[in-house]
Image (cartoon, rainbow, N blue to C red):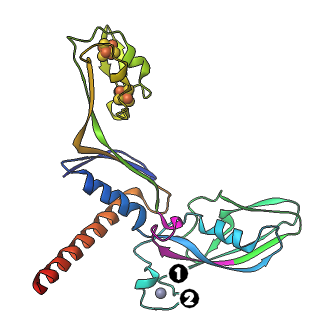
Amino acid sequence: MKIEVLEKDERNMRLLIRETDVPYVNALRRIAISEVPCLAIGEVVIIENSSILQDEMISHRLGLIPLKTDLDSYNLPEECECKSEFGCNLCRVTLTLDAEAKEGTRTVYSGELVSENPEIVPVSDKIPLIKLAKEQRLRLEAYARLGKGKNHAKWQPISKCTYKYLPKIEIHSKRCDSCGKCVEICPRKVLAKSQDRIEVRDLMACILCQDCVKACPQSPKAIEVSGDESTFVFNIESTGALPPERVLAEAVKILDKQLEQFENELKVKKDED
Ligand code: SF4
Ligand code: SF4
Ligand SMILES: [Zn+2]
């Protein structure tokens, strides 16, 4: 397998993965979504709530705030040595909030949560949590723990993970009369007409919709679009909880572990037979 990074920033990564197949890339996608852990608020103790919103609604909103995650310093609750229902410093982070509307109506944002670990904070300070009217107050303690997306979407470290075949576009110059119909219909502006010739301007933008082929009046068609079934354009978008490359590296580790476990189980079964 060969991997090339096409684009990368703090939240997004686009890769070209060659010499592989759908079962492998799809397994990585599914594991990245549902098995790679991240931190999210799981329990909330409301000390004072004179707002108009119920405690449960506030807790639900808190749970959905993505938190910067440190996978190297925290354990999954079920794997932590403390074995405690309440958790310990290695499997739980406490965040507190004390917000009051002294002057008049105001919005409380995620940035007002105070974490006991300055590394574990909301990925954005600007997520609105609640509106308080004058003299209303909200005081609470929230406990964040590692969890997995398969149990609740709040524990998904990524908001999007997709892949597609690398597009292949072929224009048969002998049959093409440069009518331009394929250029006009393409929703992604992949094709362009230049000096009476049709050119592929942005191959990666192609979504393999086949509209250009359907629009071509020639018979047989002068344009052919297909996907390379062993090469994939893989997109991953993080919520900000973890860098996208870390999510992918963790997904590979988890898949390797699952395959090893499967192999061992097969061996045990064979020995029993
Ligand atoms: S398959 Fe769709 S996206 Fe790709 S070039 Fe043709 S019309 Fe454009
Ligand atoms: S629609 Fe067909 S004939 Fe017309 S420019 Fe495109 S490929 Fe050529
Ligand atoms: Zn613990």
Looking at the picture, does residue 223 appear above or below residue 259?
A: above
Residue on which the image places disc 2:
86
Image quadrant of ligand 2?
A: top left
Tell me what residue is drawn at x 48 percent, y 71 percent: 151
As drawn, is 85 to the left or to the right of 256?
right
The image quarter containing residue 99 is bottom right
Quick check: can you spot residue 247? Answer: no
Q: Earlier in the sequence, mark 1 or mark 2?
A: 2
Quick check: can you spot residue 187? Answer: yes
> Where are the magenta residues, as a range?
141-156
> Is residue 151 shown in magenta?
yes
- Mark 1 → mark 2, Cα distance in angstroms: 8 Å
Tell me what residue is drawn at x 51 percent, y 85 percent: 89
As drawn, is 152 to the left or to the right of 8?
right
As drawn, is 269 to the left or to the right of 75?
left
Q: Position of residue 164 (x, y in %)?
A: 33, 43
The image quarter containing residue 253 is bottom left
Q: Nearer the viewer, residue 48 or 209?
A: 209
Q: Which quadrant does the C terminus fall into?
A: bottom left
Camera-side mark, 1 or 2: 2
Residue 76 tag number = none
Label 1 lies in ligand 3 vicinity (Cβ under 8 Å): yes
As drawn, is 148 to the left or to the right of 117?
left
Q: Secondary structure at mark 1?
A: loop
Do the residues under discs 1 and 2 have CB atoms within 8 angstroms?
yes
Which amino acid type is marked by label 2? Phe
Q: Position of residue 199 (x, y in %)?
A: 30, 19
Q: Nearer the viewer, residue 197 or 177?
A: 177
Which amino acid type is marked by label 1? Arg
Q: Position of residue 93 (x, y in %)?
A: 55, 78
Residue on which the image places disc 1:
92
Tell me what residue is drawn at x 82 percent, y 67 percent: 52
